[in-house]
């Protein structure tokens, strides 16, 4: 039978979510998402992202079976910030069929064109502040928390439709043993002494101080990342929404500020890789997820450095290296033996140099964002 692609409403979001399982039957490295979390993310009424964005979900079906899916997304704040007409695609899943992929991309492109967009960019789920990028190198490794995973053939489907690379995103591996270096310790001490660098933890226990710390984190994030390619400031509501989601899984030891002579210069957020627990939650259910988190969390041996932000006036002082090094010190004498710094823009030369040279990391995975002009 022929394949049909149709737009769906919020009443079929659960079908859109659950069809993802159709494409990962033989992928041992895939981590099933928590269905509850996906419903929350895709809720256009509850997720504050959709106060300035619009999304249309599509399903590709054949003989009653879902064989592909895609989301088309417009982000008003992105186009205001970058003065362009870029629309996005996300949540892409597809059988290994170019015809099916083409039909999905054509549907998404037409929807975006009707809304005045001249370019399609993706994958983003649903923005660069969320999970994004197509895995193009590192398929033999399990994804870290809030990073994507996909079959290897997806790149061919995307590129044969006419998409071209816009930007690569890097994931670097950090090993605990490499932090036991006299050279690195001397470098850290020299930077701290020269600039009066100190470390201060985010206060998770004092509600009033925690609220102030979250406000400071938001200000640094929106300022430090402003020059980055594709970046869009998060609204107050969006930042608070994400912070509330991440707080239950955050480890207070790995969320801290760096200060220069008593003034906040930057912050780092590293999260325990709970994917090591959730990979066992095969059906994505809430009870199963809670069970695996409770019984396996103490065995987690990796953290992901999700955000490292340094205010512009301190970006060439080496305080970023101090923050990375501090993570290495804090995981000593814990079950954590490694970490991942992700994602880093391929042309963020300063950060790449700091990771590869100063912190002795290795490039572990590569993710790609694609662009295509709408014709």
Image (cartoon, rainbow, N blue to C red):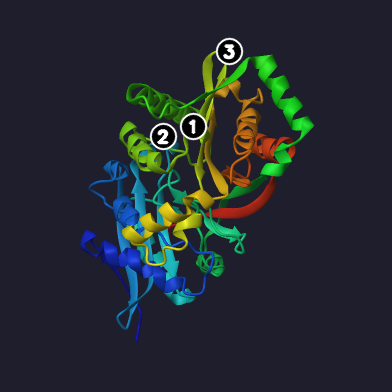
Q: Residue 241 placed where, x, y %?
A: 33, 39
Residue 75, position as x, y percentages in the image: 36, 45
Q: Callout 3: 10 Å neighbours few (<14), some, many (20+)?
A: few
Check disc 3 and report the residue beneath it: 261
Left-right relation of 287 to 257: left
Q: Residue at x 41, y 34 (%)?
A: 233
Q: Along the polypeptide, which appears first: circle 2 or circle 3?
A: 2
Residue beneath the point at 65% across and 31% down? 321
Which label's residue is closer to the chain start, 3 or 1?
Answer: 1
Horizontal relation, residue 91 to residue 255: left or right: left
* Mark 2 residue crowding within 10 angstroms, few (<14) / some (14–19) / many (20+): some
Residue closest to the far top: 261
- Of marks 2 and 1, which one's residue comes earlier in the chain? 1
Alpha carbon separation for disc pair 2 and 1: 7 Å
Q: Quadrant of residue 65?
A: bottom left
Residue at the disc numbered 2: 233
Q: Is residue 192 placed above or below 307 in the rendered structure? A: above
Q: Are marks 2 and 1 in contact (CB under 8 Å)?
A: yes
């Amino acid at each position: 039978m022929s394949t049909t692609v149709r737009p769906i409403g919020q009443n079929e979001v659960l079908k859109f979510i659950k069809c993802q399982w159709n494409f990962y039957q033989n992928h041992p490295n895939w981590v099933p998402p928590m269905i509850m979390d996906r419903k929350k993310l895709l809720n256009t009424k509850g997720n504050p992202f959709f106060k300035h964005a619009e999304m249309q979900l599509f399903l590709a079906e054949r003989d009653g079976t879902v064989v592909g899916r895609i989301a088309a997304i417009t982000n008003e704040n992105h186009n205001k910030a970058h003065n362009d007409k870029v629309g996005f695609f996300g949540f892409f899943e597809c059988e290994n069929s170019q015809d099916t992929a083409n039909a999905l991309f054509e549907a998404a492109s037409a929807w975006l064109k009707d809304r005045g967009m001249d370019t399609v960019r993706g994958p983003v789920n649903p923005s660069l502040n969320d999970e994004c990028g197509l895995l193009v190198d590192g398929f033999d490794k399990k994804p870290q928390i809030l990073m994507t995973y996909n079959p290897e053939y997806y790149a061919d489907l995307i590129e044969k439709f006419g998409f071209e690379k816009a930007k690569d995103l890097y994931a670097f591996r950090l090993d605990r043993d490499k932090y036991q270096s006299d050279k690195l310790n001397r470098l850290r001490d020299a930077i701290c002494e020269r600039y009066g660098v100190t470390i201060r933890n985010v206060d998770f226990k004092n509600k009033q101080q925690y609220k102030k710390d979250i406000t400071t984190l938001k200000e640094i994030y929106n300022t430090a990342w402003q020059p980055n390619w594709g970046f869009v400031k998060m609204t107050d509501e969006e930042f608070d929404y994400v912070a509330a989601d991440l707080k239950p899984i955050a480890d207070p030891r790995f969320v801290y500020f760096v200060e220069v002579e008593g003034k906040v210069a930057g912050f780092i957020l590293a999260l325990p890789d709970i994917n090591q627990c959730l990979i066992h939650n095969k059906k994505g259910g809430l009870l199963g997820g809670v069970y695996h988190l409770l019984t396996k969390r103490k065995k987690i041996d990796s953290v992901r450095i999700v955000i490292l932000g340094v205010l512009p006036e301190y970006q060439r002082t080496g305080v970023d290296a101090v923050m990375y090094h501090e993570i290495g010190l804090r995981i000593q004498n814990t079950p954590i033996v490694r970490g991942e710094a992700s994602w880093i823009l391929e042309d963020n030369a300063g950060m790449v140099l700091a990771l590869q040279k100063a912190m002795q990391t290795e490039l572990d995975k590569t993710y790609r964002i694609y662009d295509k002009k709408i014709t």
